[in-house]
Image (spheres, helix red, strand yellow):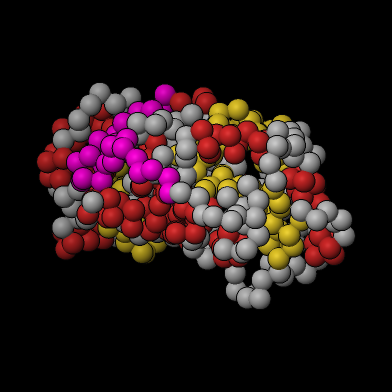
Amino acid sequence: MKIVYPEDYSSASIQRLLDDADSDVLFLGDPRVNIEPGPHMFDRMAEVMRETGAGWVYADAMGHPRIDYQIGSIRDAFDFGPVVGVSAHAAREAAIDGAWKWGALYDLRLRISEKHPIVRIPEPLYSASTIDARPTGQKQFDYVDPRNRDYQIEMERIATAHLKRVGAWLQPQFDKVPVTEKNVPVRASVVIPVRNRERTILEAVQSALAQRADFEFNVIVVDNHSTDRTTEILRGVGDSRLRHIVPERIDLGIGGCWNEAIYSKDCGQYAIQLDSDDLYANDGVLRRIVADLEGGPYAMVVGSYTMVDFSLKEIPPGLIDHREWTRENGRNNALRINGLGAPRAFSTSVLRRIGFPNVSYGEDYAVALRISRDYEIGRIYESVYLCRRWEGNSDSALPIEVANRYDQYKDWLRTIEIQTRMRQ
């Protein structure tokens, strides 16, 4: 047995490897990586494929555990590692469909997954060099880099076809946004969850309070028991529009802090996100977002942001505008990508029906997926937000175990959403 390396991931290249396969299992390797198979890698992967009926198997590497594949693991960037075993029979049965330039292996994997298990072997069967040594905080924006636009369009087409085949694709038909609750205290609330951000919290709050609008708004900061000077700084802000909440509970994640805000008596008709280390781009952002929410009317509006360093100097990839979103297919493509963008703004009445999961990663994605199932989401493609990337970001350089946990959670969210849509 041996590893074969595709010239590229076009339909012609992958089909040629399948046609030339002379065994039941085809071992595909990443040509960018030096792979050193363990003494029993080939036998073990073939054995697991036979015993489980898998159409696709992958394994952990030395020092690099993977995560299990789920129904919701449909993103094209799922990390199988640099070597996979593919059932020749399952691959031929799946039959690549389309003249793909980059996505033939992605298409093949999704088609195989519809009829056969995709199985992870939680054993380190090989060692390999690192494909991409960049920290997690840099890699996570590759899919919105405008240089990758044609690639992303092809991946969206492949994922959309898969959702249609499994019965999870939704047509662009949306429910009406429910009537706003009566007696709301203000038109809009800027919501800022925070813990230990003494270097940035004052700038964030001032950015929100500086908004110029022809309606009343407030700023709800949920201070999650900070142990630095954050609480002291907030108490020193002399503006009656600031609501400083310190939760009674001590087990809240970011999602739990959002719940403290949206279910409070102070929350307005709309809830608009601002992270504790970020800023609005100008003093008209709040007015613009509310106008878009009401213009739809939309249950949720997502803006665009500019990546900046700590001193607010623009850094690559610059503007993140999520132009992959379309009214016709955005709610379906949302199942392929890892996020919808920022800042996020919501109808509070819709949020209160759903609530946030009490986690500190993926809570916004969970809510966005749930909203997109029923309601139309509006977009703003101009930059209205400055997103700081610095060493204080919670996702700037994650250990592999944490990155795996986060990816597994988002795959689980997608699994629940896909299963629900299939039942509908």
Residue 136 visible in the picture: no
Res. 39 image quadrant:
bottom left
Work out whether residue 248 or residue 66 is closer to the camera in this orientation and state it.
248
Q: How many marks?
A: 0
Name the spot of residue 262 as percent of width and height, x first: 58, 59
Q: Residue at x 70, y 33 (%)?
A: 284
**Quadrant location of residue 47?**
bottom left
* Residue 9 spot, x, y in % from top left: 33, 31
- Point out residue 23 in the picture as x, y percentages from the top left corner: 15, 45
Depicted 159 relative to depicted 262: above or below: above
Name the residue at 62% across, 63% down: 265
- Magenta stretch encompasses residue 158: yes
Using the image as rendered, state which of residue 405 and residue 264 is in the foreground: 264
Tell me residue 3's x, y (percent). Answer: 30, 43
Is 40 left, or right, of 138 in this rendering? left
View extreme (front): residue: 183
Between 237 and 128, the one lying in front of the other is 237
Tell whether 283 sits left or right of 150: right
- Position of residue 303 relative to residue 247, above or below, is above
Q: Which residues are magenta?
A: 150-178
Residue at the spot 56% in from the left edge and 44% down from the top edge: 344
Instruction: Find out whether residue 403 is within the magenta segment.
Output: no
Report whether residue 186 is seen. yes
